[in-house]
Image: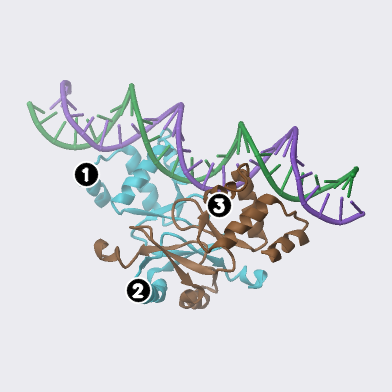
Chain colours: A cyan, B brown, C green, D purple
DNA sequence: CCAGGAATGCGAACTGGTTGCAACAGATAC
DNA sequence: GTATCTGTTGCAACCAGTTCGCATTCCTGG
């Protein structure tokens, strides 16, 4: 957390209350949260931090490589710390989300490199499908 | 194409000019098109087909399993025939899109089933990354 | 060819996110 | 401490992509 603040400073950016609070939220636990959820959380401490400020700060933190955002479905994007690198499996039926470690995608990465010379980054978009509980219901 | 029209009829849906034209566009070639692009194409024959009609028809065709939509990036969704089943690799640098056959994802599918009991459907969201041309530039 | 309901055109609403701008507030120098 | 310079913020307006409500149109089975 202090490292991130220093990183901000070293880029000529300033350490403001809203940024400090936002980072606190992000470091608190590893949950994936939308900009709106983060805003609500920040606003419990500082009520008039505006949603657009949250977006701007998330943007900046993403440029610095501190956070990343991922799309888990059709709704809003979710943000989390870049240190927790993982892909996402999302059930189309029940919405359950599983985190999959980086090496879960190794085979796909090799196939992409071999067949297309393509270097994949499988973290940005979730992989949809059906979880163990819902798969039987859908039959296939 | 006639099969699809029959399918519509058999569901109590009606065969209208806008649906016929839309299907013609979709069958014409295998390109991925956004709703807006399809609307523009349809409108060359029938100028006052409204964009919302295109959306409604695409929705219906998707419910019937005739078309599917995929998200290739942050922009609008793209629609194509469900018969052309494939995944998508999209370059984050240059935007190039590669189609990957279903079996390209077999290894990932097996891993998902083994580790999580999860049945993946890798077609809905593209897999981002860097294509052969852009990968060296980004270094990794 | 007619009734009834599905589909359409239209504009307005909605969601998720971005932007322009005047006011504000960290950081640095004094 | 305070002046100052510049990055940041609150706000409202905007934007893209998509959905919705409703009066009108027009397929289709009878």
Indicate the position of residue B66 as horizontal and vertical percent values: 64, 63
Q: Residue at x 53, y 76 (%)?
A: B113
As drawn, B118 above or below B64: below
- In this rendering, the label closer to the viewer, 1 or 3: 3
| Viewport quadrant of the C terminus of chain B | bottom left
Marks 2 and 1, Cα distance to the nearest angstrom? Answer: 38 Å
Residue A129, quarter of picture: bottom right
Residue drawn at the location 28% of the way across and 51% of the way down = A64
The residue carrying pointer 3 sits among few (fewer than 14), some (14 to 19) or many (20 or more) residues within 10 Å by Cα, namely: many
Residue on which the image places disc 2? A113
Q: Residue furthest front?
A: B45
Q: From mark 1 to mark 3, how far is it between C-alphas? A: 48 Å
Provide the residue designation for mark 1: A9
- x%, y% of residue A79? 41, 52
Closer to viewer: mark 2 or mark 1: 2
Q: Position of residue A99 (x, y in %)?
A: 46, 65
Q: Are marks 3 and 2 on the same chain?
A: no
């Amino acid at each position: 957390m202090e490292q991130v603040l220093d990183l901000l400073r070293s880029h000529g950016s300033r350490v403001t209350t809203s940024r400090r609070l936002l980072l606190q939220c992000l470091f608190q636990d590893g949950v994936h949260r939308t900009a709106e959820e983060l805003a609500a959380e920040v606003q419990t401490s500082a009520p008039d931090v505006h949603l657009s400020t949250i977006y701007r700060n998330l943007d900046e933190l993403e440029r610095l490589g501190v956070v990343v955002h991922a799309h888990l479905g059709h709704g809003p994007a979710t943000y989390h710390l870049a240190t927790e690198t993982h892909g996402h499996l999302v059930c189309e039926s029940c919405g359950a989300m599983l985190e999959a470690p980086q090496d879960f995608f190794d085979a796909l990465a090799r196939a992409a490199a071999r067949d297309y010379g393509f270097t994949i980054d499988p973290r940005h978009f979730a992989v949809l499908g059906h979880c163990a509980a819902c798969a039987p219901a859908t039959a296939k």
